[in-house]
Image (tube, grey):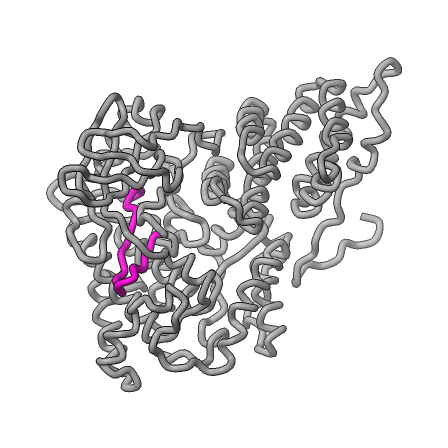
């Protein structure tokens, strides 16, 4: 079940992990009786509640106390409610009320029963063409309405597209939107230069911190449609930063290569939505909606009767929907999507190449970027922009639940941000970040927090305390030894391993005769062998 209001997380600077909030289950806030907690995000908690006066269920979003004390954050929260309340539309999650009770600021939204698109993909794999067109047309209609009001969503992604059991599609969470009404100056309530959005679906202008307009939502929706049709996002990489850079620098593998069974016209629509230059995209969601309508009419195999039934969500409850059988090639897509996750550590370009090679399809026309090339591209961005993208990667997985894959990916993104702070010797920021990870519910996050604290102590020239922390990790006994978990974490995160080796070398250099370096830690002082991607040249001998 999805509440339709999964919050877009925006962690505080140098923190990345929102502080714990008390559970409000059982409380009554104004006209709303809180039934149970549904989720937690950067802006606060989301609950299922009953609006007492109207006897209806609502999703109640509670603003975090520290944000409510911030005038800018409070204004942003109120702006979100006012903007979405104006955008009355069947395909937009509606705002019912906004208020304050006992110092708690809340927003009541339409409660949507069903699944979001990401959950649907994980369960069913890529939908058939009639379903895709029905989803695309309804989302485009929602974006058209938002565009008419000057509202930019700024975070279109599968998690924010909800599918109800009645066949409706609803766009949720306009929490990152900014109202650009023509009769008033743009409201700038976010810190100057801060990039908002999710790396997998960010537009190039978001990545670069340039001004955005409704065409940025068209790009992110195009990326979402690519994911919907291909079974995986167009760009993947070792880090959130590398993924974001590819939106600026790289071209995705054409959809028609991955799905030769798709209509060429549909692939062309998605390609136009994903144009790097906003001027080459659809200029409005209305233009996109017109092309989708024409495409539906052109595909004569889709009868009007079939089209009207295609999104009846019998498929959500496990009963196949009445849709034409897809070509047999499509059966491999869920396997390819799963493989892409396993191979993500090898970098997005290598993943794409391997996936297509394994399916006997031609590789991309352009050779994948090498590690060296990616490092050169990263060097073009300021540390501030890189930090913004890294924090966005952390927020994407800060609440991984019990999904092992999500936990592994989340730990990787947290390791990436922690290493960034250590590389730049921002030890205060690193210490705060790792300290908060130590209190996380997921054990790999806690392990990373403890490991990070040991590294911070090393760079603070406290070798004895640092070595003690490292040894505690190695010698701790649980049902399974912590050492095995630590080795797995380092194997999955080579840059983290490199930083651990550097920290221990620092401790060894600070060792004395009275306080020697413990040789039990020697194996961690060996930096990992760097992973070479397709396109990397082997290092010359002697270097």
Depicted 331 relative to depicted 168: above or below: below
Q: Could you tell me which residue is drawn at 45 percent across and 56 percent down?
A: 247
Nearest to the observer: residue 344 or residue 364: 344
Q: Quadrant of residue 419?
A: top right
Q: Is residue 451 magenta?
A: no
Q: Nearer the viewer, residue 387 or 142?
A: 142
Q: Residue at x 62, y 59 (%)?
A: 343
Residue 215, picture quadrant:
bottom left
On the picture, is 362 further left or further right than 488? Answer: left
Q: How many marks?
A: 0
Region in magenta: 160-176
In the depicted view, which residue is nearer to us: 385 or 447? 447
Residue 109: x %, y % from top left: 23, 43
Residue 480 falls left or right of residue 133: right
Expressed as whole percent of the image width and height from the top left, the position of residue 508 reads 81, 25
Q: What residue appears at the point 14 percent right and 46 percent down from the top-left corner?
A: 86
**Residue at screen point 52% across, 68% down:** 334
* Residue at the bottom extreme of this rendering: 300
> x%, y% of residue 264?
38, 79
Q: In this rendering, is residue 489 above or below 517? A: below
Q: Is residue 89 above or below residue 52?
A: below
As drawn, the residue found furthest toward the top would be: 514
In depth, the one of 428 and 432 nearer the eye is: 432
Looking at the picture, how far across and down is residue 463, in whole percent? 75, 20
Q: Is residue 174 within the magenta segment?
A: yes
Asked if residue 399 shows in the view, the reply is yes
- Residue that extends furthest to the right in the rendered view of this protein: 513
Q: Looking at the image, can residue 267 be seen?
A: no
């Amino acid at each position: 079940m999805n509440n339709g209001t999964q919050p877009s997380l925006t962690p505080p600077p140098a923190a990345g992990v929102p502080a714990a909030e008390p559970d409000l289950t059982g409380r009554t806030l104004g006209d709303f009786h809180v039934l149970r907690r549904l989720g937690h995000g950067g802006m606060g908690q989301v609950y299922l509640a009953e609006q007492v006066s109207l006897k209806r269920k609502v999703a109640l979003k509670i603003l975090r106390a520290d944000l409510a004390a911030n005038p800018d954050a409070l204004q942003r929260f109120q702006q979100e409610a006012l903007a979405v309340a104006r955008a009355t539309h069947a395909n937009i999650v509606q705002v019912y009320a906004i208020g304050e009770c006992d110092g708690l600021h809340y927003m009541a939204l339409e409660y949507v029963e069903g699944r979001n698109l990401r959950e649907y993909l994980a369960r069913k794999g890529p939908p058939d063409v009639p379903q895709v067109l029905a989803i695309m047309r309804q989302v485009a209609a929602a974006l058209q309405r938002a565009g008419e009001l000057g509202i930019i969503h700024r975070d279109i992604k599968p998690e924010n597209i909800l599918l109800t059991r009645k066949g409706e599609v609803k766009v949720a969470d306009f929490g990152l939107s900014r109202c650009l009404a023509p009769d008033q100056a743009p409201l700038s309530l976010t810190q100057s230069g801060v990039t908002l959005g999710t790396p997998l679906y960010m537009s190039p202008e978001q990545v670069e911190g340039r001004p955005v307009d409704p065409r940025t939502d068209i790009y992110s929706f195009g990326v979402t449609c690519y994911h919907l049709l291909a079974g995986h996002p167009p760009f993947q990489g070792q880090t959130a930063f590398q993924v974001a850079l590819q939106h600026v620098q790289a071209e995705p593998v054409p959809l028609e290569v991955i799905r030769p069974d798709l209509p060429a016209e549909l692939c062309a629509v998605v390609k136009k939505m994903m144009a790097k230059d906003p001027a080459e995209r659809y200029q409005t969601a209305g233009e996109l909606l017109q092309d989708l309508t024409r495409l539906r009419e052109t595909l004569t195999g889709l009868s009007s009767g079939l089209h009207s039934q295609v999104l009846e969500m019998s498929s959500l409850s496990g009963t196949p929907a009445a849709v034409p059988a897809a070509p047999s090639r499509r059966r491999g897509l869920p396997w390819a999507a799963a493989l892409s996750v396993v191979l993500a550590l090898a970098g997005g370009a290598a993943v794409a190449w391997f996936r297509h090679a394994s399916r006997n399809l031609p590789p991309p026309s352009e050779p994948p970027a090498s590690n060296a090339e990616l490092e050169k591209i990263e060097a073009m961005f300021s540390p501030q922009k890189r930090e913004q993208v890294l924090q966005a990667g952390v927020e994407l997985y800060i609440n991984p639940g019990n999904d092992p894959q999500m936990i592994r990916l989340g730990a990787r993104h947290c390791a990436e941000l922690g290493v960034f702070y250590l590389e730049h010797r921002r030890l205060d920021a690193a210490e705060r970040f790792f300290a908060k990870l130590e209190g996380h519910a997921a054990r790999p996050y806690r392990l990373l927090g403890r490991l990070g604290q040991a590294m911070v102590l090393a760079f603070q020239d406290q070798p004895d305390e640092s070595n003690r922390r490292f040894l505690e990790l190695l010698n701790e006994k649980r049902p399974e030894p912590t050492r095995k978990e630590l080795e797995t974490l380092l194997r999955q995160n080579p840059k983290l391993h490199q930083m651990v080796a550097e920290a221990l070398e620092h401790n060894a250099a600070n060792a004395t005769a009275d306080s020697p370096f413990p040789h039990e830690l020697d194996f961690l002082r060996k930096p990992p062998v760097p992973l070479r991607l397709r396109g990397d040249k082997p290092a010359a001998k002697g270097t």
